Amino acid sequence: MKYRCVIVDDEILARRLIQKHLAQLDDFELVASCASAIEASKILKAEKVDLLFLDIEMPILKGTEFFKNLIEKPKVIFTTAYRDFALDGFELNAVDYLLKPISFARFFKSIEKFLEYQKAMNTEAKLSEVVKSDFIFIREDRKQVKLFFDDILYVESVKDYIKIVTEKGSHLIKQSLKSFEETLDARFLRTHRSYIVNSHKITAYTKQDVEIGKLELPIGDSYRSIVLEFLEN
């Protein structure tokens, strides 16, 4: 994944310096380099942007005023030639502020702050997903039976049915594997046209199969690249 960035500064040399610093980072790409907030506004309406490098003191519209008025706000690192303006930036929940001229060492420190923030947000999102999707009800023997995701080892397609194998036993219900997959959360991994496994339960794997304890479940040819990428990252 690459983080998409926009530079906004009325000074061309300042924009070029930040662009030079960004070019040294593989995970970041420059969407646009803008000479004014008005120019940047058009870009933000048309493009997905993760991070703004925004000069505070600009003619017509200050960077802080521009940012306050944005409805959808990307993360922002303010840049300024004036130390006194830094407080304005922090009041707007900025990742950081950079004092011109900007060295690469100081620039990289701001980038690390941004990455730490992204990591925290991703962790929070994953935890939230687990909390919201902790269990499911399945219809069995004319009853709705509560089944916790954490108990599921794997799910197998058996003709018009699926077999849900848990640590305590198994459940056979009439449902397609595809439709059941849509009810599961991000921990579940389709490894084969006939199998879905709980990735948290995998104890070992090869290019041909995944192991859950003593069980060996196949990895289909068409799923192999996705499965290996999921398990190795």
Image (tube, helix red, strand yellow):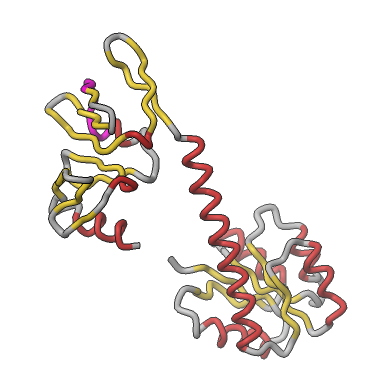
Q: Nearer the viewer, residue 187 or 203?
A: 203
Q: Is residue 179 visible?
A: no
Residue 83 is situated, as x and y percent measured from the top left of the image, at 84, 81
Residue 131 is situated, as x and y percent measured from the top left of the image, at 51, 37
Q: Which residue occupies 20% across, 28% down?
A: 163
Place residue 37 in its image quadrant.
Answer: bottom right
Placement of 32 over or under 20, stated as above or below = above
Placement of 63 over or under 210, stated as above or below = below
Quadrant of the drawing holding the C terminus: bottom left
Q: Tell me if 130 is positioned left or right of 103 in this view.
A: left
Q: Tell me if 206 is positioned left or right of 186 in this view.
A: left
The residue stretch that appears in magenta: 172-179
Q: Which residue occupies 53% across, 61% down?
A: 119
Quadrant of the drawing holding the N terminus: bottom left
Q: Nearer the viewer, residue 70 or 81?
A: 81
Residue 49 is situated, as x and y percent measured from the top left of the image, at 56, 64
Q: Which residue occupies 50% across, 85% down?
A: 24
Q: Nearer the viewer, residue 206 or 53?
A: 206
Q: Nearer the viewer, residue 179 or 135?
A: 135
Place residue 118 in its image quadrant.
Answer: bottom right
Q: Tell me if 3 is positioned left or right of 57 in this view.
A: left
Q: Which residue occupies 20% across, 56% down?
A: 205
Q: Is residue 133 magenta?
A: no
Residue 188 is situated, as x and y percent measured from the top left of the image, at 32, 43
* Count of marks, rendered view: 0
Place residue 62 in its image quadrant.
Answer: bottom right
